[in-house]
Image (cartoon, rainbow, N blue to C red):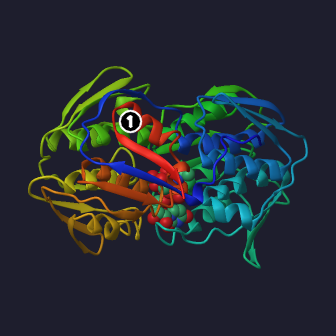
Amino acid sequence: MSSTGTYNPVMDQIVVTGGARLEGSVSVLGAKNAVLKQMVAMLLAPGVHRLTNVPGILDVELMGKVLDHTGAQCEFYGHTLTVEVPDDLRPEAPLELVRQMRASIIVLGPLLARTGIASVAFPGGDDLGARPIDMHLAGLRALGAEFELEHGTVVGRAPEGLTGAEVDLEFPSVGATENILLAAVLATGETVINNPAREPEIQDLARQLNAMGADISGAGTSRMVVSGVGELHPVDHRVIPDRLEAGTYAVAGAISRGRVRVDNCVPDHLRMELKKLAEAGCGVDRGDDWIEIDGPERPNSVDFATLPFPGFATDMQPQMVALLASGEGTSVVTENLYDARFRYLGELMRMGADVTIEWQHAVIRGTERLSGCPVLAPDIRAGAALVLAGLRADGYTTVSDVQHIDRGYEGFVDRLASLGAVIERRSA
Ligand code: EPU
């Protein structure tokens, strides 16, 4: 796949000088967590597919490599991704690719559906926790697949093809829902997924698949029904806006005591997050495809718990915690999705945040003054949150390991600078 940029992200640092109030508007791109799965969905139909509104981020480049490995050819130009899928696929995703991006596991279902066999390196845990794939495998087993773990690789076989079944997910896992969906669209007969994930990205994936000729109903509800079809065809599809990117810029406005408008977003995808920003004392205005946040001098304390959509997104938790760390009063934040999502709090505490962690609860006592210092970005969202904390902190905050931020945000530094942030990216 042609590169989305030339950089050596591992060595780069982001340096923020705190104090500037952000003002102005910023436009977000397509949703990372939609586009990655939509790239994989293309493998279900030979021919030339096109996705538009695709962000130029590292994860898209990595998923491009996964597709390349199967024999597909990807071209990325001007936020349009064109993928040519061959008739015959190489049904595997090797460890060096899965290690770089665990979302690669999503090729399991579609490769089984297309070829009857798939070998995908077992994704281990990562910075967010153990992250098992038991529900992916149980769902695909219900459709007739058999799996063995061979030397660190999940080898799946469906010699008789896949057959529709009723699958009860004990938790609405995004990835498991997608893997099952991507297998069920070409299976024989009807598949029912009870308690699927209801995220907007799942709904957009279903829209793309239906345009390709699939028969899916109930996306966005607690029961999805998929009637298998014989074949699918390529389509052009525009990716929905990234609610997490939009939410991150909204918090940037709030934490800097500024006024920021985020364009090209879907405010309804951020209902809970906007509700909590309003509780924190932010002015929140919204139109059909924009939101505007007016940051308070000191945010109020707010309690929240992360939950699957439409609950508060775990991928907005670190940004919101950065805001509350500079607020008044004590906030209690409960993380229900990941066992290690609070790891970044050690870095935030180095900046002066007053936080105590008790199991999956963080107690945040707001402090008037955060203080810039060198910090490490442990994952995409925590990395972004540390940059946001730097907007508020005294002096310089130097964020290293910025390759994590590049995974999910196109032009993060430039976009923040366009809003008036004093920020730059430096090559070490
Ligand atoms: N889980 C299991 N077993 C499974 C699958 C999941 O126990 O078979 C657990 C996970 O360990 C985790 C929880 O269920 O504790 C939620 O996992 P889920 O499957 O819903 O998440 P995912 O598909 O692995 C996607 C996003 C994440 C986002 C989560 C939750 C992509 C590529 N990733 O991950 O996004 O946090 O849904 O909304 O879509 C990010 O963008 O920064 C990011 C981490």
- x 34%, y 39%: residue: 421
Of residues 213 and 70, which is closer to you in this image?
Answer: 70
Q: Quadrant of the C terminus?
A: bottom right
Give x and y (percent) for residue 345: 32, 67
Q: In this orientation, does residue 329 appear?
A: yes
Q: Which of the 4 image quadrants contains residue 258?
A: top left
Q: Which of the 4 image quadrants contains residue 305?
A: bottom left
Q: In this view, does 187 lie above or below 167?
A: above
Q: Is residue 271 above or below residue 156?
A: above
- x 26%, y 39%: residue: 20
Near mark 1 (Cα within 10 A), the count class, few <14, some 14-19 or many ≥20, is many
Image-based side of 167 in relation to 373, left or right:
right
- x 73%, y 60%: residue: 144
In the current view of this chain or complex, which residue is farthest to the right? 88
Of residues 351 and 214, which is closer to you in this image?
Answer: 351
Image-based side of 193 in relation to 369, left or right:
right
In the current view of this chain or complex, which residue is farthest to the top? 288
Give x and y (percent) for residue 319: 33, 51
Q: Is residue 255 above or below residue 294?
A: below
Label count reads: 1
Q: In this orientation, does residue 173 appear?
A: no
Residue on which disc 1 sits: 269
Of residues 201 and 221, which is closer to you in this image?
Answer: 201
- x 29%, y 68%: residue: 350
Of residues 186 and 173, which is closer to you in this image?
Answer: 173
Give x and y (percent) for residue 200: 47, 38
